[in-house]
Amino acid sequence: MLKFQLVSITGTKYDDEAYEVLVPTRAGVVSIFEQHMPMVSAAQPGVLSVRKKSSDPDSAMENFAINGGIVEVDGKTVRFVADDVTTTDEVSEQEAAAAHKRAEELVKNAPNQTALHEAHRLLHHSSAQLQIAKLKKRHHR
Amino acid sequence: MAQTKIIQRRIRSVKNAKQITKALEVVAASRMRRVVEAVARSRTYGNLSAAIMRRIATSYEAKTHPYFAPSSDKPTLYIVMTSDRGQAGAFNSNVFNLALDDFKADKARPQVLVFGRKGARFFAQLAGIDLVGAYEDIADIPEANVFSPVLDLIADAVNEGKTGTVKVIYTEFLSPLSQRTTSFQLLPIDVPTEAENQLPKEIAYEFEPEIGDVLDEGIKLYFEAHLMQAKIEAAASEHAMRMVAMGNANRNASDLIDDLTLELNATRQAAITQEIAEITGGAAAISQ
């Protein structure tokens, strides 16, 4: 087991034991287990998932939508620090879908390269939120 | 009679002022409670971002990064946290005094970026500085992206060689009754090496995908966390100081009302005594 801390500006979102943590980084999704080599990595907007016990199926994983951030691993502890973290409880599918649509508009109408880059980031973030909203819906069924 | 009317009018106006100060005190107290919770969270976040920065700062790439280079004689950029509203005791003037002291020690013309309407007005009229930006009506607990224009501004200023040092001047929230105006050096990044770092087992961290990306993200996080913390602490201090100032004003108003009521009674009594004296005097004059 490893210890996983997820801290955002609005507070600590997760601080408990975990079996596996899936982090979307710039180089792809990294799966972190106990005894992972010490690593510091920049995260990509996407869905971060936590498996609490090794017997948990994928549907029982806890999901968070993140908008970038830094993950630090030292073998026993995983710390994830990000400015914007959305938990499944905080997101509604309707809102996420609306945000996703807005981001798509922004990508289409971006006046310059920087704005386009920012819009893409927003798009990734909103699609991550939409994804966890859908995951939540599936579990409730 | 005229005298008592004047005193009565004054009592009424002091009573109105007392009501206002009472309301402001209650509002400030409730807003402070809300912000104080956020102070603790922002401190955790700030400490974590500093801890991560400490990991990154030992790498070679960080040592050659312009943000870590010791400052030269380039101008200093001050980010000053003030309030939008007044009636908060010495909150803003403490911040201004500290800023002015810091400006005096500077050789180059200081650059100022200010949060809060009071500060924006003060620094707009101040000679000998460059006001590079002013932000008003920012929430007590802002969203993280509020600071992204500030980060862009810092990045541009450093790349163009206009700024070497960035300092944040804000009011640290110690307790509801105690706040301290302080300045924090944001740039060049100087993370204090704690005992943790001096342990013999120095872990070699792998940076993925590459150190440059991690460094950029880490710096963004570090800046955001510290600006956020400064803003939230300033907001908490502002409300705490307003609460105390308004509490004092409220008590002063009560004292004033007591004094004026005594004075009113005395003058009214004097007027009655005089009237009786006049009547008895008149009656005595008639009977003689």
Image: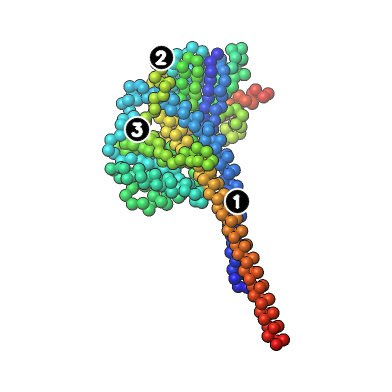
Residue at mark 1 shares a chain with residue at mark 3: yes
Q: Using residue B282 as the reference point, say whether residue B164 is left or right of it.
A: left
Chain designation of label 3: B
Seen at 43% across and 28% down, the residue is: B50
Quadrant of the image containing the N terminus of chain B: bottom right
Q: Nearer the viewer, mark 1 or mark 3?
A: 1
Q: Nearer the viewer, mark 2 or mark 3?
A: 2
State the mark number for residue B188. Answer: 3
Quarter assignment of residue A129: top right
Quadrant of the image containing the C terminus of chain B: bottom right
Residue at mark 2 shares a chain with residue at mark 1: yes
Q: Amino acid at mark 3?
A: Pro
Label 2 – label 1 distance at C-alpha = 57 Å
Label 2 – label 3 distance at C-alpha = 27 Å
Q: Find disc 1 in the rendering and name its residue.
A: B23
Seen at 49% across and 49% down, the residue is: B89
Seen at 56% across and 24% down, the residue is: A14
Query: Looking at the picture, how far across and down is residue B220, in whole percent?
Result: 42, 31
Disc on the earlier residue, 1 or 3: 1
SS of the residue under disc 2: loop
Seen at 35% across and 32% down, the residue is: B188
In the rendered image, is residue A127 in sight? no
Query: Looking at the picture, how far across and down is residue A91, in whole percent?
Result: 59, 31
Q: Find disc 2 in the rendering and name its residue.
A: B201
A119 or B113, which is in the foreground? B113
Query: Looking at the picture, how far across and down is residue A141, in whole percent?
Result: 68, 23
Q: Amino acid at mark 2?
A: Lys
